[in-house]
Amino acid sequence: MISAIAPIGMTADACLALLQNSTIEEHGELMAAMTDPMNALISFQQALATGGVSPQMAELHNDVLVLFDHPNGVPRFTYALVREQSVVAVAVFVPTDPIDGTTCFNSGYAVDQRHRSKGLGKEITQKAFDELTEGFRRAGFPGLYVEAIVSTSNEHSQRLANRLFSDSPTACTDEESGQPALQYVRRLF
Ligand SMILES: CC(C)(COP(=O)(O)OP(=O)(O)OC[C@H]1O[C@@H](n2cnc3c(N)ncnc32)[C@H](O)[C@@H]1OP(=O)(O)O)[C@@H](O)C(=O)NCCC(=O)NCCS
């Protein structure tokens, strides 16, 4: 059973301790596997079906489940969009390098193949932003960034990131694949 606590239930000190104690760079490939959004979607669907996870209802949106876990010591927030008792989309957040001293989460998002191009990717990402903003503001954080690293070949994901993260991405290299990518950054608050 994976432990689940809502980020909204954590104090700022507890959040910060978790984020600072995670040695992200040491995990390398493991991080890449954990943040792969399609893996996250499929494993969340499977774990939910077999009772392997106990997510909580999100605070603001009643069609969203939230799971906080820390595989291999790395904190991870997963927000899952539910339709007709099935998880159809997820948005996943793990801490990455702070920006100007402000906490930043790397984001991944995925929609079940059968439900794509209906706005659900944008919906779960925006709802996750709402929940993170609410929870981390209340926990006393002074600000919060989110980033998405998107392959230059993933036009569909670029469209989503362009809408919800930033319309001025920066060229970068995807550390996992070594392929050219775009970094989209947004300050949530
Ligand atoms: C990327 C992904 C999450 C998008 O989710 P979705 O629910 O299908 O997308 P949405 O319907 O919310 O649409 C998002 C944007 O893409 C556009 N879009 C929809 N279908 C598209 C397609 N087939 N090709 C390109 N853009 C498309 C939409 O018009 C929208 O842009 P707009 O707001 O400017 O009109 C989904 O395709 C997916 O799960 N892909 C595999 C996993 C992945 O690549 N994740 C991202 C890793 S960085």
Image (cartoon, rainbow, N blue to C red):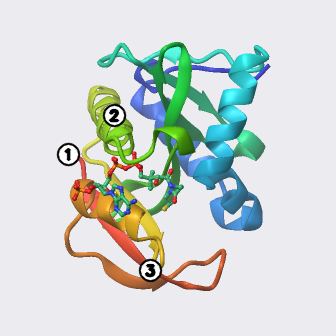
Mark 1–mark 2 distance (CA, rounded to whole Å): 9 Å
Answer with mark 1 or mark 2, whichever residue precedes in sequence: 2
On the image, numbered disc 2 is attached to which residue? 136
Q: Say which of 89 and 104 sits in front.
A: 89
- Whether pointer 2 and pointer 3 mark residues with C-beta atoms closer than 8 Å, the reply is no
Q: Position of residue 107 (x, y in %)?
A: 46, 53
Q: Secondary structure under badge 1?
A: loop
Which x, y percent locates residue 26? 73, 65
Foreground residue among 179 and 111: 111
Q: Which residue is mark 1?
A: 189
x, y percentage for residue 153? 48, 78
Q: Nearer the viewer, mark 2 or mark 3?
A: 3
Instruction: Indicate which disc, 3 or 1, sits on the residue closer to the N terminus.
Output: 3
Q: Which residue is mark 3?
A: 152
Report the residue at 59% width, 18% height from top.
55
Where is residue 166, by image quadrant? bottom left
Q: Quadrant of residue 30?
A: bottom right
- The quarter of the picture where the N terminus appears is top right
77 w.r.t. 48: above or below = below
Q: Tag 1: residue type?
A: Phe
At label 2, the amino acid type is Phe
**Cα gap from disc 2 to disc 3, whole angstroms:** 31 Å
Which comes before the other along the chain, label 2 or label 3? 2
